Amino acid sequence: MRFRPAVEDDLDRLLGCVVDESISWSHPDRLLSFLESGAYRFDRIWLAEAEPGGEIMARAVWWGFPGTDRPLALDCLYVAPSVISLTDRVGLAADLLGRAHAAYGEAPAYHVFLSSGWRDDPRASAAIAWRWEAAGRAGLTDELERLRYEWTPADAPVPEPSDRLVFREDDDDEAFVAAFMRVAVGTLDHHTRQALTGMGPEAQAREDVGDYRSMPGERAWWRLAFDKAGELVGVALPSANNAGPVVGYLGVVPEQRGHGYVDDLLAEITRFHAGRGVQRIVADTDTGNVPMARAFERAGYRNFAIRLVLSASPVNT
Ligand SMILES: CC(C)(COP(=O)(O)OP(=O)(O)OC[C@H]1O[C@@H](n2cnc3c(N)ncnc32)[C@H](O)[C@@H]1OP(=O)(O)O)[C@@H](O)C(=O)NCCC(=O)NCCS
């Protein structure tokens, strides 16, 4: 078996890889549009072939911000239907991921989108089971479930403006770096906690601000929130990804928590997008971030799916 990153000449064969299982995958429309936008790149797609130019036996597709070199997340793991034995599927997929990780010098997390009741759905469970095992063998041993929420005007009315907070723009990124650092203290968000142990508060805040800047949402949408006394309460960043408008990020500084300000921040983001005529807003939060999940539910956001994130344990990276 030969493992290698794809090149442009592979396009037709890459488009011929079809995942006929109950799981998210890089289908031809997604592949073409993401290759066009730069979110996918040929050198961030790896394939396994038995002989040069022959059938693609396995394919792994990573996603990244356009214009950056780092692959951020594994988006799709495919093994040809002709590989029938589960042991062979797992082995082949694990080998492919292992080769790519070695070339990248890191093991990006695998993000899988599943329906909320996937554990009770034999097709969805089977589709994730062999991939989960392969990802684990390739070092992605930590698992995290995130709840995916959506808001539409049909689900819930557009909220009223907050009567206790004032929202301000600030074109100085340093103001957001400082606010992100404060908001990250005591966070229940798994990714932020992991990043804080790895790199410390200021570097973590800068990386986050940089990541939100790389998203398709506009920087001018970001807001700082203050109470009537002029004290900082938190941040509210409406944003967008390739699929459309998202909540982006919001947070309350530790000394202001427990007053339900999360509702005011989320309402501001919802109002902002609705005011632009947006018909669907999507958001994710960890199952363990209970105050955030409750706020989405109070605001009429509907849990429509799960994002399963399989990542390398920080002790192994
Ligand atoms: C999630 C968050 C915005 C909630 O803000 P909030 O305005 O304090 O939320 P609520 O007032 O509804 O809090 C409800 C309860 O949860 C508690 N709580 C809120 N955040 C908490 C935290 N990080 N850790 C422990 N408890 C927390 C509150 O104290 C309150 O408890 P009480 O009912 O006993 O008084 C806030 O925790 C935060 O900024 N976290 C860091 C950033 C984050 O996770 N953002 C979401 C990313 S998707």
Image (cartoon, grey):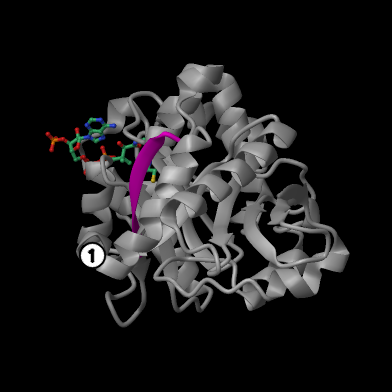
Instruction: Report the image quarter containing ligand 1.
Output: top left
Residue farthest bottom in this picture:
154
When asked about the image quadrant of residue 41, the answer is: bottom right
Asked if residue 7 can be seen in this view, the reply is: yes
The location of residue 132, given as percent across then percent down, is 41, 47
Q: Nearer the viewer, residue 142 or 98?
A: 98
How would you rate the neighbour count of disc 1 (Cα within 10 Å): few for under 14, some for 14-19, many for 20 or more?
few
Instruction: Tell me: 18 left or right of 117.
Output: right
The residue sitting at 45% across, 58% down in the picture is: 85
When asked about the image quadrant of residue 220, the answer is: bottom right
Residue farthest right in this picture:
9
Magenta segment's dominant SS is strand
Q: Which amino acid does label 1 sit on?
A: Gly
Q: Which of 76 and 225 is in front in this view?
A: 76
Q: Which of 126 and 178 is in front in this view?
A: 126
When asked about the image quadrant of residue 227, the answer is: top left
Asked if residue 248 can be seen in this view, the reply is: no
Does any atom of ligand 1 lie closer than 8 Å to the CB of label 1? no
Residue 167 belongs to the span the image colors magenta: no
User: Where 250 falls versus 306 (above or below)?
Assistant: above
The location of residue 192, given as percent across then percent down, is 45, 31
The residue sitting at 26% across, 51% down in the picture is: 293
Instruction: Tell me: 47 left or right of 316.
Output: right
The location of residue 271, given as percent across then percent down, is 41, 66
The location of residue 151, given as percent across then percent down, is 35, 70
Q: Mark 1 points at which residue?
A: 117
The residue sitting at 71% across, 58% down in the picture is: 40
Instruction: Tell me: 297 left or right of 211.
Output: left
Instruction: Tell me: 235 left or right of 303.
Output: right
User: Where 316 falls versus 232 (above or below)?
Assistant: above
Count of marks, rendered view: 1
Q: What stretch is highlighted in magenta?
A: 140-149
